[in-house]
Amino acid sequence: MNALISEQSDFTQTHIDIENVHFTLLTGRGINKSKPDPKRALEPMHFHSSYEVFYVTSGNFKVTAQETTFEYKKDSLIIVPPRLMHNTVLENNGTARFCINFFFEKNNVKSDSRLYDTLVKLLGETIISSSNAFSVYDSFKKLNDCAFSGNHLRLSLYFHEFIVNLIELLGQEPLKLSFEALSDDKISRTHKLHNLISACYTQNISLDELANQLHLSTRQLNRIIKANYGCTYKEIITQKRIKAATNLLKASNMPISEIAEKVGYNTLKGFYKAFDKFYDCTPSQYRRGSEKRR
């Protein structure tokens, strides 16, 4: 499995064989019915090595890919293919959705069902969506309900049901959006870019210095960052610093001045200004709110 620009390391893998296909189902936070989180909208564009399937249960759900944003309403199903740069946003407090991640490969079972070929043909490498996906709702909900039960048999049966319903739905020719997945050379470059940014966001590394390390011109790097993350280099650095700061605020009693310095701010004033822009509150207010939610 490819390295991910995402948080799939928090997922638990369940292996399921159906006919001539070996599935790896990823369960964890993502399979739950998720509600809006202000931090989600601040995260950079990313991609997964798995298929990511969403079912909108209420409100408006947005998916951005290649600088274009699409909005989906209740009872929509959206499938984001592996290697596609994207971001998702739960628009408001009236929005919620289910999500499941999986990938598959052909196994050694001899079968007349041609399930593997069917999935390859139906899923492809583009975003797929259906606005009236009622037929998969029940299986999605069942998967969600037993995700943490530890009952592998029940989880396998519900996933089998989900795949059957999904194939039937996709056979009705839902809308396909022409966004190509990343090629291997682009993945390598994107991984290197992401790793460099993750390693240096607490330092004052300029865009020119980063471009030199990647053997690119500043203009080229600007275009790549915009295409992959949907924002500027400065915005990415700020996002990462504030996210790291919120983690420290929630998980430690470290003084705010030390947190500001640790995540890369030279002045406390600059940290407070950036934090307020993201959360419309001070770091102290955020910490108190986190303590109340525990």
Image (spheres, rainbow, N blue to C red):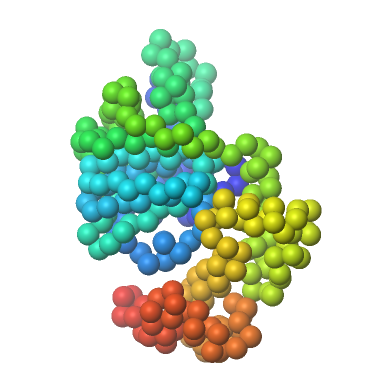
Q: How many marks?
A: 0
- Residue depicted at 35% across the width and 64% down the height: 37
In this rendering, would 88 be left or right of 252? Answer: left
Q: Position of residue 45 (x, y in %)?
A: 51, 54
Against 104, residue 67 (above or below) is: below
The residue most toward the front is 219
Q: Nearer the viewer, residue 212 or 260?
A: 212
Q: Position of residue 241 (x, y in %)?
A: 56, 73
- Residue depicted at 47% across the width and 28% down the height: 124
- Residue depicted at 44% across the width and 77% down the height: 277
Visible in this render: residue 240? Answer: no
Q: Nearer the viewer, residue 70 or 154?
A: 70
- Residue depicted at 29% across the width and 35% down the height: 130
In this rendering, would 126 be left or right of 166? Answer: right
Residue 263 lies in quadrant: bottom right
Residue 127 lies in quadrant: top left
Q: Nearer the viewer, residue 267 or 164?
A: 267
Q: Position of residue 227 (x, y in %)?
A: 57, 50
Q: Position of residue 279 (x, y in %)?
A: 40, 76
